[in-house]
């Protein structure tokens, strides 16, 4: 049985599960991007819907009705359409996703300060300090589900358990729109009923290796000598899986989890070899990436690019800057130089991406002003653009070369110009 197909194991006890000591919650929004998108399309609720874009793009999310046909996240759109030809395809709305994500995280923070976000739509919560005020862990979990549904109009599933590993398993088995409690005394039975593919760290290859050893359930792993697992999988992996098979997971919920990198990719509608168009794409992606870094209140020292060719060969290049930055112009200049250094001539390109790495909190990282920067510099201009985007919507202010009808090459130091004031220039721009 694949790890994608396992179901909730049957409980041996007839009474409701005892949540004493189950102070770790894993909360996960149900088909988050699809559910959030459908808030503007209520007539499509209950039908197969795919969130994605373009003939050559990939699936960002899908409703459970579409998933029943085999549609999955990151699947090429062409394959998704073949699997579910009756599905409605809608473009993503990242502004809506960001707004809802922030509201959901605020709901978590109102319950407990010990929140460990894993992504925009899921997090671990340690509610041990909240039970005296708010009730049992299961009661708190239901309160979260009700609040998210009432205030955001979407559903979430929650796993309640004594450890992070078991809580995440439980939330997956609760989907969609469910709540699963795994009592302390039932952890081992709960875990060992599952197929090996349910364990963290077991990908397709490891699952195949385990099955070749005759290990198909977690109980099989639990009752295999540790030395045998270590010989087959390596010391670290063998011990890791053996511990999980007995429900052992000593990790605490970490209240702050910083992103290690932030980036954006673009898959072109057709393969291109025009450096002007590629520079335009790099400019747009640099702008988007730097804005996300600023939104996360971080700065980064390393800029990397990714280039995928028509034959799907992919290369990456990176450069570490002398000073950390969150300035769109500096990110674009570095990304463009990295691309130009490749010396590509008429190479057919399918995708490009820009990423910032080596991220640190902006508040604690000194930023060196550039000697050639005007008194009111690029960093100030970026923040003005961020404020305008927050007020008027993403894309309301953008580089001039990205405006409709512009076919020019993005110049170094290209200014952003807003749709409402086309003559507005950033510091240092020439007439």
Image (cartoon, rainbow, N blue to C red):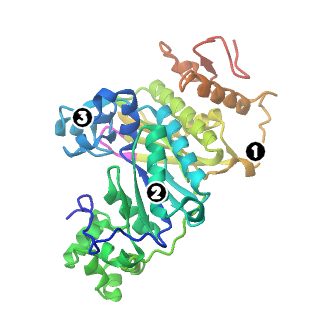
Mark 2 Cα-neighbour bin, 10 Å: few <14, some 14–19, many ≥20: many
Nearer to us of marks 2 and 3 is 2
Q: Which region of the structure is painted magenta?
A: 309-314
Mark found first going from the N terminus, 1 or 2? 2
Asked which secondary structure carries label 1, the reply is loop
Mark 1 Cα-neighbour bin, 10 Å: few <14, some 14–19, many ≥20: few
Looking at the image, do the residues carrying marks 2 and 3 touch, with CB atoms under 8 Å apart? no
In-front residue for pair 10/87: 10
Mark found first going from the N terminus, 2 or 3? 3
Q: Residue at x 23, y 39 (%)?
A: 80
Q: How many marks?
A: 3
In-front residue for pair 273/203: 203
Real-space Cα distance between discs 1 and 2?
42 Å
Residue 128 left/right relative to 82: right
Name the residue tied to disc 3.
47
Nearer to us of marks 1 and 3 is 3
Q: Is residue 430 above or below residue 323?
A: above
Question: Is 313 inside the magenta-drawn segment?
Answer: yes
Q: Quadrant of the C terminus?
A: top right
Mark found first going from the N terminus, 1 or 3? 3
Magenta residues: mostly which secondary structure? loop
Q: Residue at x 35, y 27 (%)?
A: 41
Name the residue tied to disc 1.
367
Residue 200 left/right relative to 402: left
Nearer to us of marks 1 and 2 is 2
Q: Is residue 425 above or below residue 6?
A: above
Asked which secondary structure carries label 3, the reply is loop
Mark drawn on residue 141: 2
Residue 426 left/right relative to 289: right
Residue 367 left/right relative to 201: right
């Amino acid at each position: 049985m694949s790890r994608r197909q396992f179901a909730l194991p049957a409980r041996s006890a007839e009474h409701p599960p005892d949540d004493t000591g189950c102070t770790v919650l894993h909360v996960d929004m149900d088909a988050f991007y699809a559910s959030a998108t459908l808030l503007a399309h209520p007539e499509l609720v209950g039908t197969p819907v795919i969130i994605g874009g373009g003939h050559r793009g990939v699936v960002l999310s899908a409703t459970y009705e579409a998933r029943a046909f085999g549609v999955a996240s990151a699947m090429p759109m062409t394959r998704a359409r073949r699997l579910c030809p009756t599905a409605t395809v809608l473009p993503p709305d990242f502004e809506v996703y960001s707004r809802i994500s922030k509201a959901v995280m605020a709901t978590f923070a109102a319950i407990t300060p010990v929140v460990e976000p894993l992504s925009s739509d899921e997090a671990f919560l340690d509610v041990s300090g909240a039970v005296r005020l708010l009730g049992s862990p299961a009661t708190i979990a239901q309160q979260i589900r009700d609040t998210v549904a009432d205030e955001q109009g979407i559903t979430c599933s929650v796993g309640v358990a004594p450890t992070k590993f078991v809580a995440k398993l439980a939330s997956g088995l609760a989907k969609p729109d469910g709540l699963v409690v795994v009592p302390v005394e039932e952890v081992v039975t709960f875990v060992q009923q599952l197929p090996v593919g349910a364990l963290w760290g077991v990908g397709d290859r490891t699952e195949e290796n385990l099955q070749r050893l005759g290990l198909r359930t977690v109980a099989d792993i639990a009752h295999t000598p540790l030395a045998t697992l270590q010989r087959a999988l390596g010391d670290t992996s063998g011990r890791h899986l053996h511990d999980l098979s007995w429900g052992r997971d000593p990790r605490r919920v970490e209240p702050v989890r910083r992103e290690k990198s932030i980036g954006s990719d673009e898959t072109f509608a057709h393969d291109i070899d025009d450096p002007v168009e590629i520079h335009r794409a790099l400019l747009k992606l640099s702008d988007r990436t730097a804005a996300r870094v600023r939104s996360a209140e971080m700065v980064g020292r390393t800029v990397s690019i990714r280039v995928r060719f028509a034959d799907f060969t992919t290369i990456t290049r990176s450069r570490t800057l002398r000073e950390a930055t969150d300035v769109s112009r500096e990110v674009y200049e570095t990304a463009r130089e990295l691309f130009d250094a490749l010396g590509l001539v008429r190479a057919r390109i399918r995708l490009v991406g820009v990423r910032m790495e080596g991220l640190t909190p902006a508040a604690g990282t000194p930023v060196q002003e550039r000697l050639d920067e005007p008194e009111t510099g690029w960093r100030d201009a970026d923040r003005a653009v961020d404020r305008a985007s927050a007020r008027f919507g993403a894309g309301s202010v953008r580089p001039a070369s990205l405006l409709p009808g512009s076919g020019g090459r993005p110049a170094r130091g290209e200014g952003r110009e807003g749709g409402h004031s086309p003559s507005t220039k950033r510091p240092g721009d020439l007439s």
